[in-house]
Image (cartoon, grey):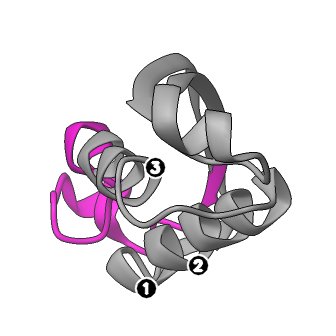
């Protein structure tokens, strides 16, 4: 297992409970720590079993800038689930 740490990924979005949060929007900063099981990818020098952190950033961006969530915790859960769906080798996000 190894970790990928992504810090201060900044996105503009419109999450929150209050109407002003949707109307004005705000900047959200995302830190992600991904625990990855590479299987044999490292031994075989293969990209197939690894997590491309550029693609992972794009997944996070798509979720954060997508549909509005009232709860930040719901947004974090959606980010984690979407990353896990895209990269099954992520065992924890």
Cα gap from disc 1 to disc 2, whole angstroms: 6 Å
Residue 32 in the magenta stretch? The answer is no
Neighbour class for label 3 at 10 Å: few (<14), some, many (≥20)? many
Residue 70: x %, y % from top left? 74, 62
Which of the 4 image quadrants contains residue 35? bottom right
The earlier-in-sequence mark between 3 and 1 is 3
Q: Is 59 situated left or right of 14 in this image?
A: left
* Residue shown at 79% from the left, 54% from the top: 17
Cα gap from disc 2 to disc 3, whole angstroms: 13 Å
Q: Nearer the viewer, residue 92 or 20?
A: 20
* Total numbered labels: 3
Q: Nearer the viewer, residue 18 or 90?
A: 18
* Residue shown at 49% from the left, 37% from the top: 23
* Residue shown at 41% from the left, 49% from the top: 60
Q: Give residue 81's mark.
A: 2
Mark 1 and mark 2 in contact? Answer it, CB < 8 Å: yes
Q: Nearer the viewer, residue 35 or 81?
A: 81
Q: Is 77 situated left or right of 30 in this image?
A: right
- State the residue position of label 3: 64
* Residue shown at 72% from the left, 48% from the top: 16
**Secondary structure category for the residue under label 2:** helix
Residue 48: x %, y % from top left? 17, 70
Q: Nearer the viewer, residue 67 or 84?
A: 67
Cα gap from disc 3 to disc 1, whole angstroms: 16 Å
Residue 9: x %, y % from top left? 47, 21
- State the residue position of label 1: 85
Residue 20, above or below 44: above
Neighbour class for label 2 at 10 Å: few (<14), some, many (≥20)? some
Q: Which residues are magenta?
A: 33-55
Residue 91, above or below 72: below
């Amino acid at each position: 297992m190894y970790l990928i740490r992504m810090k201060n990924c900044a996105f503009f979005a419109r999450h929150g409970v209050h109407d002003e949060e949707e109307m004005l929007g705000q900047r959200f900063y995302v830190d992600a720590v991904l625990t990855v099981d590479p299987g044999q990818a490292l031994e075989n020098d293969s990209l197939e079993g690894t997590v491309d952190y550029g693609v992972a950033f794009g997944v996070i961006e798509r979720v954060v800038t997508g549909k509005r969530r009232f709860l930040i915790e719901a947004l974090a859960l959606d980010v984690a689930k979407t990353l896990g769906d895209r990269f099954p080798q992520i065992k924890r996000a």
